[in-house]
Amino acid sequence: MGRAGGQRQGEELTRRILGIPLSSSEALRAGFASTAMPGYEVKQERVAIGGVDDLIIRSLLDKQQFSDPHGDAERLGISSSLWPLFGLLWPSGSHLAERLGARNVVKAERILEIGCGLGLASLVGHRAGADVTASDCHPLAGRFLAHNLQLNDLGPMKYRHGQWSGVLLPRDAIDERAPLVVHGEFDLIVGSDVLYERDERGTLADFIARLAAPVAEVWIVDPNRGNRGAFHKNMARHGFRMEEAYLDREEGDGGSAYKGRMLTYRRQ
């Protein structure tokens, strides 16, 4: 293999690891300088979202990725098996992004996405001009979000650390792009596939209630995990009324097959 071929192959490997377009030589040089840090592989793809323009998203290559060299995720209670989940595209996230894309933007409205992962819904809302804050507990979520903003030529968006599990947050355990814990009052709080535990004590509902404005709406897309009952009860405890709509979709009907529900909670 000639020198040019070897260099090209090296550039392609770096693009695969870092998700950096080859057309940007400056970004590519920065990518080579940081390859020793990530320890995971990524991919870049165009993602279709019903009703709005596509987004270009950098995500983890697969569920087998893991890199926690400084123990940041471990201190936050994120195990090696859970570590990659933030960096994958999930069907429920696409449904949430689609609904947010259909919402008329109200400039004075503050929107918060909880457990945002790659922040697909947040990116859709931000592109439409909404005042969106994305939040997650993963140490790398802010970094991936910043990269995806750049890939789509979008300006800066607020990102905050948001964790409802009760784990205390070490000062040095969160991404440098997200030095603040989520706080304030939000008019609309959204999340997808966040009911992954039964949570009888209502930790998630308490977290939402602390961040919701006195008059607020909450959207949760749930892929029928079976933990809705406890969440309904605890949201009602905080004064929220619930409405439920099925999101069942057959294969080929605008995408892959999906079974789930849109849970809408309102407090007035």
Image: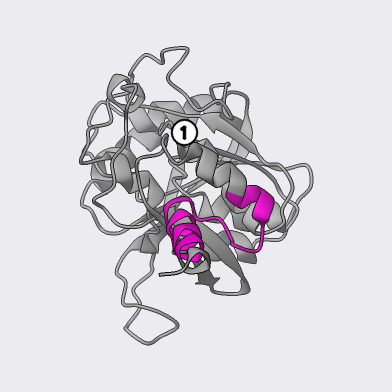
Image quadrant holding the C terminus, namely top right
The stretch in magenta equals 6-28
- Residue in the foreground of this view, choosing between 34 and 206: 34
Instruction: Please provide percent x and percent y for residue 196.
Output: 26, 44
Is residue 96 in sight in this rendering? no
Q: Residue furthest right?
A: 107
> Relative to 222, does residue 207 appear above or below in the rendering?
above
Say which residue label 1 marks: 239
Instruction: Please provide percent x and percent y for residue 46.
Output: 53, 70
Instruction: Please provide percent x and percent y for residue 259.
Output: 29, 69
Is residue 133 in sight in this rendering? yes
Is-magenta flag for residue 245? no
Instruction: Look at the numbered disc 1 and give the secondary structure of its residue.
Output: loop
> Relative to 168, does residue 72 appear above or below in the rendering?
below
Q: Main secondary structure of the magenta part?
A: helix
Q: Residue furthest front?
A: 2
Look at 41% across and 36% down and name the residue there: 36
Q: Amino acid at mark 1?
A: Gly
- Residue in the foreground of this view, choosing between 244 and 141: 141
Look at 63% across and 66% down and name the residue there: 102
The picture quadrant where one finds residue 54 is bottom right
Q: Is residue 85 left or right of residue 227?
A: right
The picture quadrant where one finds residue 185 is top right
The picture quadrant where one finds residue 56 is bottom right
Q: Is residue 51 left or right of residue 85?
A: right
Is-magenta flag for residue 10? yes
Q: How many numbered circles does the render carry?
A: 1
- Residue in the foreground of this view, choosing between 58 and 50: 58
Q: Is residue 199 left or right of residue 162?
A: left
Q: Are there few (<14), some (14-19), or many (20+) residues within 10 Å of tag 1? A: some
